[in-house]
Image: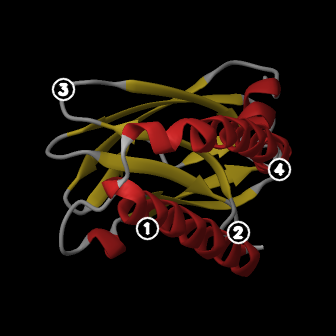
């Protein structure tokens, strides 16, 4: 999908460049010479706008349905809420506990002691299952219910310095 998006982007950028070149070349004309061109240009812009809406609207909606956030919110789980305080430091995560029970809701209270950090929870296949932002002086709350037992990685999703790539920890999800 990415090669197609790249090629389509190049094509559209080329069209925009031609549009700029057309305007630059014709910028020396008198105002009276533009009347017929203006009508054609308005029609062309209207058609182009609706064409872009028809092409990119469904593509945008289709790609947004693949995000994990709606599914994560829909699963509420049962049982008491498990609370984990998570603090980001350059370049480590500090969790109040590193294991939870599957099927029970977990509330992560995420903050940072220094700079902004992205708090991303990944499954064993490194698919993003939930995320929020860790910011100094502010606590974000992330609620998620782990359906499958296993080991989940918590990675920093925002560049926070030279050892950013090492900023990870794990949380173990035990079966009921």
Image location (x, y in percent) of residue 96: 39, 39
Tag nearer the camera, 3 or 4 = 4
Residue bearing mark 3: 137
Image location (x, y in percent) of residue 57: 79, 41
- How far apart in space, not on screen, are marks 1 and 3 (Cα)? 49 Å
Please report the residue visible at 70 percent of the width from the left and 71 percent of the height from the top: 8
- How far apart in space, not on screen, are marks 3 and 4 (Cα)? 43 Å
Residue bearing mark 1: 21
Residue bearing mark 2: 124
Tag nearer the camera, 1 or 4 = 1
Dot 2 and dot 3 residues touching (CB under 8 Å): no
Return the residue found at the far left.
114
- How far apart in space, not on screen, are marks 1 and 4 (Cα)? 25 Å
- How far apart in space, not on screen, are marks 2 and 3 (Cα)? 31 Å
N-terminal of the pair, mark 4 or mark 2, is 4
Dot 1 and dot 3 residues touching (CB under 8 Å): no
Residue bearing mark 4: 55
Please report the residue visible at 39 percent of the width from the left and 38 percent of the height from the top: 31
N-terminal of the pair, mark 2 or mark 1, is 1
N-terminal of the pair, mark 1 or mark 3, is 1
N-terminal of the pair, mark 1 or mark 4, is 1
Provide the secondary structure element on which disc 3 rests: loop
Vertical relation: 133 (above or below) 158:
above
Q: Is residue 54 visible?
A: yes
């Amino acid at each position: 999908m990415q090669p197609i998006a790249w090629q389509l982007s190049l094509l559209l950028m080329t069209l925009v460049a031609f549009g700029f070149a057309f305007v630059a070349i014709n910028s020396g004309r008198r105002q009276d010479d533009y009347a017929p061109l203006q009508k054609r240009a308005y029609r062309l812009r209207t058609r182009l706008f609706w064409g872009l809406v028809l092409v990119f609207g469904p593509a945008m909606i289709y790609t947004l349905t693949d995000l994990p956030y709606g599914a994560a919110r829909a699963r509420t789980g049962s049982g008491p809420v498990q609370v984990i305080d998570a603090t980001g430091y350059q370049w480590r995560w500090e969790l109040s506990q590193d294991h939870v029970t599957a099927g029970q809701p977990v509330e992560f209270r995420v903050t940072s002691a220094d700079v902004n950090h992205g708090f991303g929870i990944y499954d064993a296949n490194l698919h993003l299952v939930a995320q929020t932002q860790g910011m100094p002086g502010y606590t974000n709350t992330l609620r998620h219910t782990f359906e499958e037992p296993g080991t989940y990685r918590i990675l920093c999703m925002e560049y926070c310095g030279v050892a950013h790539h090492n900023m990870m920890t794990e949380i173990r999800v035990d079966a009921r």
